[in-house]
Amino acid sequence: MASRQGGPGDAESSRPGSTERRTASTTAPAGSRRSDLPFDPKTGDSRRRSSSADRRHSVSRTAEDPPIRDPGLYALTDHFRDRLEQPGRYVSTRTVSDAIRRGQLRWNRTDGWRFALVEGGIRFVVVVGDTETNSPVVVTGWTEVADREAALDARRWDPVDVDTIAVRAALSESSSTPIPDRIRPRTVTRPFVVGDHRLKTEPGDPFVRCADCGCRFRSKDAITSRGCHGRSGR
């Protein structure tokens, strides 16, 4: 069955062509009780379905049934709303809609059904579920570097975007494993958020450093197990 816990995934950029840099939710704020409302795939606005439509959808579906490809029927979980608000996620309601409509559909034993869509060298992964709730839901989503050269050539990304996606994905692939060699070649000058920390890294550094507390980390577990105390934590 699809898990309601997520796997791996900045503010709006004014640079032309950077449509996915915007990750702030255009639906209700994170944590809002409106998280059970579907969203309009064109505008990102929440919209209400009738309870009878919910009941019709849930009848006779099992975890093995492929999910539907109508993004307008999907609600956003609080977990995913939180991700929309975090810098460096590079996901939006538009990318979710595109992935559901056109992405490759795969079953994963951990998460359940996933849609994956590659655009501009970046793979957008969207995990959905529709058998444990009254309506189908977007459980979580993240980005991966599918083709680094293509991503660097694409106008929608700059090198910091691509390195941010690469570092975040590497940290999430094996949360407990230190990955200094995968961090060392990357340059992330705009902080991205993991746990309580806003993280950056310089070329040659085998760690990411929190821009607020100065702590250094080589694995995701180390990041998420330590709270950030701001500059006083140095």
Image (spheres, rainbow, N blue to C red):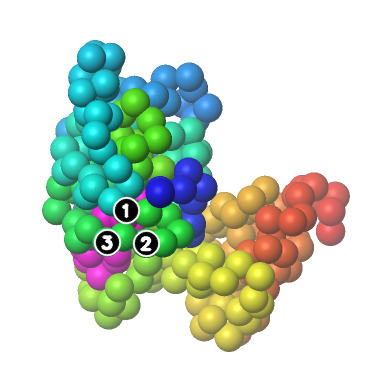
- Quadrant location of residue 110? bottom left
Asked whether residue 100 appears in the rendered view, the answer is: yes
Q: Residues within 10 Å of mark 3 (few under 14, many from 20)?
A: few
Residue at horizontal 27 percent and vertical 61 percent from the top: 106
Q: Secondary structure at mark 1?
A: strand
Give the left or right position of residue 122, taking residue 7 as reference: left
Query: Is 68 a magenta residue?
Result: no
Residue at horizontal 35 percent and vertical 71 percent from the top: 145
The answer to whether residue 13 is above or below residue 29 is: below
The three-letter code of the residue at mark 2 reads Asn
The three-letter code of the residue at mark 3 reads Arg
Confirm or deny contact between disc 2 and disc 3 (CB under 8 A). yes
Confirm or deny contact between disc 3 and disc 1 (CB under 8 A). yes
The answer to whether residue 177 is above or below residue 212 is: below
Q: Residues within 10 Å of mark 2 (few under 14, many from 20)?
A: few
Q: Secondary structure at mark 3?
A: strand
Give the mark nearer the N terminus: 3 vs 1.
3
Confirm or deny contact between disc 2 and disc 1 (CB under 8 A). yes
From the image, tell me which residue sits under label 2: 108
From the image, tell me which residue sits under label 1: 113
From the image, tell me which residue sits under label 3: 106
Query: Is 118 a magenta residue?
Result: yes
Give the mark nearer the N terminus: 2 vs 1.
2
Q: Which mark is residue 50?
A: none
Q: Main secondary structure of the magenta part?
A: strand
**Which stretch is magenta?**
114-127
